[in-house]
Image (cartoon, rainbow, N blue to C red):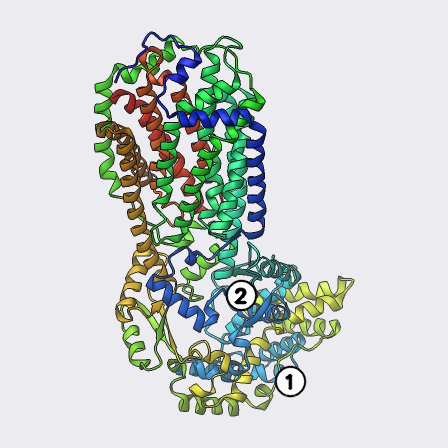
Amino acid sequence: MRSSNTSGNQPKSNAVADGATQPHLVEDWLTRVARHPWLVLAVCVVLAAAALVAAARLLGVDSDPIAMLDEDLPFRQADERLRAEFPDFDSTLLAVIEAPTPEQASLAARRVQARAAEMPQVERVRWAPDSEFFARQGLMFLSLDELETLSERLVEAQPLLGRLARETSAATLFGLLAQIEESDRAAEVGFDVDAVHARVAEAVSGTLDGRPVVLSWQRLLGAGDADGGASGDGKAAGSAREILQITPVLDHTRVLAARAVMDAMDELRRELGLDAGPVRLYFTGSTALRHEEMESVISGAGLTGLLALALVTAVMLIGLRSPALSAIALVNLALGLALTVGFAALAVGRVNLISVSFVVLYIGLGVNYAVHYLLRYREIIMHDAPGETSAARAAIGAGRFLVHPLVLSAVTTALGFFAFVPTSFSGVAQLGLIAGVAMVITLALSYTALPAMLVLVQPRVPPARPDFTAGWRRTLEWPLAHRRLVIVAGGVFVAAALPATLGLRFDADPLNVRDPDAESVVMIRELLAEREGGYRNIQVLVEPDRPVEPLRRELEALPTVARAVSLESLVPEDQDEKLELIDELAWVLGLDIVEADWQTEPVEPAALSEAARELADALEGTAGPGARRLRSELSRLVGRLDETADPAALAAAVNRALTAGLAPTLGRFAAGVRGAELVTRERFPDWFTAQWHSASGTRLIQVFPDVDVLDFDRQREFTEQVMGVAPGHATGGPVIQLAAGRAITSAFRQALVWAVLGIVTVLLVTLRDPLAAAKVMAPLVLGGLLTVALMVVAGIPLNFANVVALPLLLGVAVDNGIHLVSRHRAGLLPDGNVLKTATARAIVVGAMITAGGFGNLAFSPHSGTASLGIILAMGLALMVVATLVFLPAML
C-alpha cells in the first residue's frame, strides 16, 4: 500500500478533503451543522443540562460489594437468605475497645454501650457480658478446669478480699497489705504478695504521672501476665479488647448511607475521650468497611478527576498549540460527560464501587476523538494560504475525512466495554454499559457540538508546516528503514513475555482493594490475625427438618476447622459439677464477698496519706523488688498529697486506679455466684436465640477457621472443606470471596474473548482485508503480553477493581491502529511516512491524554482503583508504542 504523494508536498485543503472516499451523507450533515451552529450547540447544551438534572435527582451509589455480582449466582442467594433470616449479619458495625487491662476495656465498653444505645442513629447494641442472662450465668460457661482454677485463686485471696468487700477503697487496700507484712503472714496468703506490690506500685506510679490506669484485679487473681497489669502506655502484648456489635440505622437515600452513624460514632469517641490515650475506641465491621471504602472511592474519584482534567488541559495546550482549540475540546468533553452521567442515571440508577470510576475514564477517553478532529482541522488550515480555507470548510473536511476511523474507533472501544455486559460480574457490566454508550455519545458530539463550535469560534491557526528536524526525521523514519529488525524484535518480545504471563494471579481478598490505612481495614486485619470477631467465619444454614448436631460434629471434625458452634452446642457441659463447685465457693468466701457490689467508696486525702505511710513503714524490711518499688511510689504519693493544691482530686484518682477494677471483675463474679442455675436451651434470652434460630425455623452453625485466613490458600482450603460438607448451604465471607473470585475470573476470560472476537470481526468487516486486520491486532497482542508480564514482575495481581483493564485496553488501543491504517490507505503522506502526519500526532497526544487520565487513578486511596489506573496507563503506553513502532514497519 503506497502513498500517492511521497515528495513531502501537501496539497490544498480541498484536495485533502476530497481525497477521502467517505459518503456524501456525512458532508451533507456537517454542512447543515455549519449553517445552523447556534441551533445545534443550543440543543446539545439543553440536553446536557437535562442530563445533569436527571443525574442529580436519580443517580445514587450502591456501596455493597456483593451487589456487584449477579444475584442469580448460588452463593448470592445463600447470602441473601442469611441476611433475611438473620438480620444481625447484615450491615453490622463493630466497636472495638483496646485497653491495657481487661477492667479498663470493660469500663469503657459499658460507657460506649450506654451512650450508643441512646443515639437515634443506632437501632441496638449487643455486648454479651452486659446482658442480664450472661451476668448471672457467666460462671457456667467457663470450663470445669477454668472454674476450679478461679476458685482456688479466690480462696487464696479471701483474706485480702473480705475486708475490701466491706470497704472498697485504696486506704483499705494499703491497710490490708500493711497487716499482711506486719503479721508476717505473707507466706500464708497463698499467692505472690510481691507481685501484688509490683502491680499496685505501677498503678500508683501511672496515676502520679498523669496516665489513666486501672489495677487489673482479673489478672491479679488469675493466671497473671508479664506486663504487670496496670500499664497505661497503649496497646501492648498484654492488652485487652472488648467488642460491641452495633446495628446502625442507615440512610439509603444518601450516597454514603452510613455517614450519619459514623459521624455520630466519631463524636461519641471524642466525647468519651477514647480517641487518644491508652484506652482507644475503633470501628470496623461491614458498615465501617463499606463506608470507608465508599469514602475512599468518592474522594479518589474527585481527586483523580481533577488531576485528569488538569493533565488533559495541559497536554491539549501543548499538542493542539491553540488555547481556542483546547477550549473547544474541553467544552465538548464537558457536554459528553454530562450526557453520560445522565444516561447512567436513567439506565442504571445506582452506580457501584467500580462503575463510579467511569467519570475519570471518560475524561481520559472522551477527548480523544476531539483531538483527532481538531488536529486534522489544524492540518487543513495550516497547509493553506491565509484566508483561503474557512473554518466551516475545514471543519467539514476534517469530519468527512475522519468519519470512517472515528466510527470504527467508537465501535471497537465500545465493544471493549460492552464485552463485560453479558457477564455475571454486574459491577463491571454496569461500567461497560455506561462507558460503551459514552463512546457513542462522544462520537455524536464530534459531529454536532464540535464542528458547530469550530464554525462559531473560528479559531486561528498559524499557517506553517511542521518543521521536522534532521534528528527527528531520522527517528520517525527508523521503523520504516529497519522493518525486518523491528518485526524480529517484536517476535523476541512476545517470546520473552509469554512465560511471565503464566504467573498472573487473581487476588480475591476484598481487603486488598481497600485503603490499607483506613481504620476499619487496619482493625479487621488485627482481629483476623488474632482470630477474633468472627469476620471470616462460615455460616451454614440448616433446614428446619434436618438434624443440626450430626452436621455440626462433621464440620468440627474437619482439619481446618477450630470449632463449629450451634445453639445446642452452647449449652454448658458438666453443669452439676459446676453448680456444686459454685455453692462450695460461695460458702468458703462468705456473704461479705458474694453479696458485695464492689463499687469504689470515697476516701479522704488524710486517710489515704496515713494508710500509705503505714504501708511504706511495713515494707521497710521487705526485700522483694515489688515491695521496694511500692515503698518508693508510696513516698511519692505522700509527698504529692502534702504539696498539691487539690489533694482530694489526687486521692480520688489513686482510689479509682486501685479499686475501679474490682466491680468489673469481682462484681461480675459475685453476680455469677448468686445467679448460677442450670442452663438449658429454653432459658437462653430471645435476642440470643434469634441469632441462631430464625423465625422460619432455619438453624445456624457458625464455623470457626483453624487456619490463617489472611493467607488465601489456607482460607480456600478451609472454605472448600466446609462447602464439601454443606454444599449450597454455606455462606459468609470466605465462601463469597472464593465463589466471587471464580465468577469474576470467568467473567474476565469471557469478556476478553468477546472483546477480541468483536474487535476482530469489526476490523474484518470494515477493513475488508484479513492481513490489514491482523496488522492492527499484532501490536495490541504484543502490548497486552508485555503489560501482563510487567504486572507479574511488579507483583500487581488482578482484583475485583482492575479486572476490566485488559479488555478495555484492547478496545481503546485498537483505535490507534485503525487511525494509522486509515491514514495510510488515504495516502497524502509527507515523505511517504504515516508517522509524520497529523494522525500520528493525534495518536501521541491522545495517548498522553488517555494514559494521563487513566494514570491519575493511581493516586486514589482505594487500592483497587489505584491498581486499575496503573495497569491502564502502563498498558496503554506499551500498546501505543508498539503500534507506532511495529505497525508502520508492517504497513
Q: Is residue 342 above or below residue 667?
A: above
> Residue 506: percent from the left, percent from the top?
32, 49
Q: Is residue 573 above or below residue 552?
A: below
Q: Residue at x 59, y 70 (%)?
A: 113
N-terminal of the pair, mark 2 or mark 1, is: 1
User: In this view of the protein, which residue sits in the foreground, 555 or 416?
Assistant: 416
Q: Is residue 865 above or below residue 473?
A: below
**Circles 2 and 1 in contact, beta carbons < 8 Å:** no
Q: Residue furthest right?
A: 645
Q: Is residue 550 visible?
A: yes
Kindly report the distance in space between the C-alpha atoms of the residues bearing marks 2 and 1: 30 Å
Identify the secondary structure beneath mark 1.
helix
Q: Is residue 344 above or below residue 640?
A: above
- Mark 2 — residue? 625
Q: Which amino acid lies under the numbered mark 2 shown in the image of this protein?
A: Pro
Disc sitting over residue 166 in the figure: 1
Label 1 CA crowd tier, 10 Å (few <14, some 14–19, many 20+): some
Q: Residue at x 29, y 44 (%)?
A: 754
Q: Which amino acid lies under the numbered mark 1 shown in the image of this protein?
A: Arg
> Residue 293: percent from the left, percent from the top?
49, 52
